[in-house]
Image (cartoon, rainbow, N blue to C red):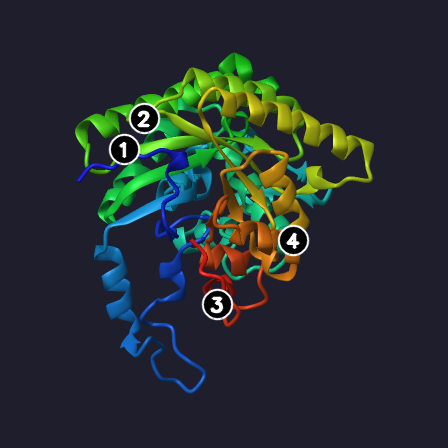
């Protein structure tokens, strides 16, 4: 069966099952070798974990919230890191969300001894610090791929193969093209000098994949970046230019934080307005709109995303359970949005307190779709 629905299709809850550097992977929380406190194997619904994992792997799935750069194949990244001269890796960078100084070169080069060591360095699994800590992991491996057409094409193809291997029969993969393009100082020696070249490269891979694997289509969502409103107009333009199925763009997103929802700061208000104009342009062109909201911020952000950004879907949205207006808006049968719940991501980003307090528990009380 072929699925030809777009971001607007309103599919039911989907789970991220790809083994990724982001570790937003339900399989990582259901590993058969993970023991309970009393030393016995964990069980889920009375079954041994390995049986549940096997069932999940074999079941046909649709995945609507997965970040391409958060699902890069770790072995390919490790190979790329070992091949790069250390001087080509940035020494350090101040992160845009916290201002902390990240020692990129030292952390990468000191972890190249083995694949598990490298994966531990660039993965968010087992680390604390919320969404900011997760985003720091991206900053560590971005220098390995930025502006490099060959490796981004390889990683995109590997992602598609992994989706098929886990029987994900329909995927909408998202990414911020500007974050994968070369830095300005590297443009003379790059193969992907700008966002348009990134989208072109990824689209070519996805379209070729869809042609040879029509039962496992992968479409794309282009991301604006919360703290980079200046790129949003171009994101909308690129989304419209590459609009289509069979590997094309079906929607736009605003990701990487929720600072632009702040209403008492002129800079953030201006950012919100810029994002809003870009999303409206994309929607008027027939594209879907999904927005990260209620993940690291309040339920009020979900309301604004729905009412002012015109979102059809909400990425994460966990804080609606502590915000009456947001919950009522999401329960409205006439306008009920799709909530993209990502179970292990919600725990890793500290959007929910712990593994025993999953968003699905609250979702069941109001018949979430």
Of residues 269 and 143, the one nearer the viewer is 269
Give the structural element (helix, strand or loop) at label 4. Answer: helix
Report which quarter residue 278 is drawn in: top right
Point 45% across, 50% down: residue: 118
Q: Which residue is mark 1?
A: 4
Label 1 and label 4: CA atoms lie apart by 34 Å
Q: Residue furthest front?
A: 334
Q: Residue 40: where, in percent of width, then height?
A: 35, 84
Q: Give the x, y percent position of residue 201.
A: 38, 21
Q: Nearer the viewer, mark 1 or mark 4?
A: 4
In this rendering, position of residue 96 left or right of residue 284: right
User: Pointer 4: residues within 10 angstroms few (<14), some, or many (20+)?
Assistant: some
> Which residue is the site of mark 2?
245
Query: Quadrant of residue 139 in the image?
Result: top right
Q: Nearer the viewer, mark 2 or mark 4?
A: 4
128 lies above or below 303: below
Confirm whether residue 97 shows in the render.
yes
């Amino acid at each position: 069966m072929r699925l030809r629905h777009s971001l607007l299709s309103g599919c039911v809850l989907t789970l991220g099952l790809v083994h990724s550097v982001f570790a937003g992977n339900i399989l990582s929380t259901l590993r058969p070798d993970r023991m309970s406190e009393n030393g016995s194997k964990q069980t889920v619904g009375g079954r041994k974990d390995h049986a549940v994992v096997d069932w999940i792997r074999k079941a046909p799935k649709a995945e609507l919230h997965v970040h391409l750069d958060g699902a890069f194949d770790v072995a390919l990244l490790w190979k790329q890191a070992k091949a790069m001269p250390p001087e080509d890796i940035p020494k350090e960078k101040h992160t845009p969300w916290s201002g902390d100084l990240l020692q990129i070169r030292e952390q990468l080069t000191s972890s190249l001894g083995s694949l598990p060591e490298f994966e531990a360095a660039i993965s968010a699994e087992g680390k604390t610090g919320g969404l900011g800590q997760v985003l720091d992991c991206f900053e560590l491996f971005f220098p390995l791929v930025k502006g490099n057409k060959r490796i981004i094409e390889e990683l995109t193809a590997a992602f598609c193969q992994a989706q098929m291997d886990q029987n994900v029969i329909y995927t909408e993969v998202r990414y911020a093209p500007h974050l994968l393009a070369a830095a300005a100082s590297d443009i003379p020696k790059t193969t992907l000098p700008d966002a348009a070249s990134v989208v072109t490269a990824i689209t070519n891979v996805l379209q070729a994949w869809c042609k040879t694997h029509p039962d496992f289509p992968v479409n794309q969502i282009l991301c604006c970046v919360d703290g980079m409103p200046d790129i949003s107009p171009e994101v909308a333009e690129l989304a419209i230019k590459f609009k289509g199925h069979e590997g094309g763009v079906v929607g736009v997103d605003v990701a990487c934080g929720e600072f632009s929802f702040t209403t008492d700061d002129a800079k953030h208000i201006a950012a919100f307005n810029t994002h809003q104009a870009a999303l409206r342009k994309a929607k008027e062109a027939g594209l879907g709109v999904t927005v990260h909201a209620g993940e690291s911020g309040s339920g009020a952000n979900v309301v604004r995303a729905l009412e002012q950004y015109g979102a059809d879907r909400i990425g994460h949205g966990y804080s609606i359970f502590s915000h009456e207006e947001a919950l009522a808006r999401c329960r409205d049968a006439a306008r009920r949005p799709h909530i993209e719940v990502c179970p292990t991501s919600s725990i890793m980003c500290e959007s929910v307190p712990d593994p025993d307090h999953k968003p699905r528990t609250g979702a069941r009380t109001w018949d979430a779709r």
